[in-house]
Image (cartoon, grey):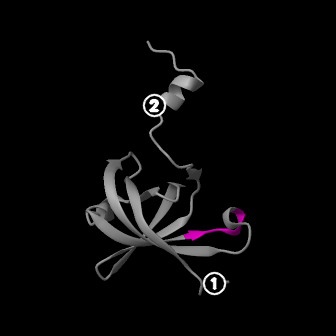
Amino acid sequence: MVRMNLKTKEAFERRERQRFNISAPLTLSIGNREIAAYTRDLSNRGVYFYLAVCDSLLIEGEFEFVVELPPEITLSTCCRIRCKGRALRKEENQSNLTGVAAEILHYSILRDFAPAL
């Protein structure tokens, strides 16, 4: 059995950017469909999100999505970010959800967002 300490864990960490553990709404645009999902974690270079298993069949290669960040994260108002991403891997879990790890290729902040009341 290998005992892992903090230094060993850091040595195996491959991520270059800080990730934020956040559950935020995410909407995928695949063709003419919009698919609801939610994030597990997010950085400026990647995202891990969950969606229904049946919808995960549509995720291949590059796709577009919008993530809505709450005021607790932005420290001001809600903010929507439009992204172009590329699926790196998919993982099915026991709750009929699929986890998707994706690289963020490009993003822009949508300035015309007013949350519904």
Identify the residue shown where x is 29% and y is 64%: 59
* Residue 94 horizontal side relative to residue 107, left or right: left
Identify the residue shown where x is 58% and y is 51%: 21
Q: Which residues are magenta?
A: 68-72
Label 1 and label 2: CA atoms lie apart by 43 Å
Camera-nearest residue between 38 and 12: 12
Residue 5 appears at what percent x and percent y? 57, 21
Residue 32 is drawn in which quadrant?
bottom left
Q: Which mark is residue 12?
A: 2
* Residue 31 horizontal side relative to residue 77, left or right: left
Which residue extends farthest top? 1
Residue 46 appears at what percent x and percent y? 45, 56
Identify the residue shown where x is 44% and y is 39%: 14
Q: Which mark is residue 71?
A: none
Tell me the SS state at disc 1: loop
Tag 1 residue: 116
Which residue extends farthest bottom? 112
Q: In the rendered structure, does residue 102 fall within the stretch colored magenta?
A: no
Residue 33 appears at what percent x and percent y? 33, 79
- Mark toward the start of the polypeptide (1 vs 2): 2
Residue 74 appears at what percent x and percent y? 68, 67
Identify the residue shown where x is 52% and y is 59%: 44
Q: Amino acid at mark 2?
A: Phe
Q: Amino acid at mark 1?
A: Ala
How packed mark 1 is, by other alpha carbons closer than 10 Å (few <14, some 14-19, many 20 or more), is: few
Whether 21 is drawn above or below 104: the answer is above
Tell me the SS state at disc 2: helix
Whether 28 is drawn above or below 3: the answer is below
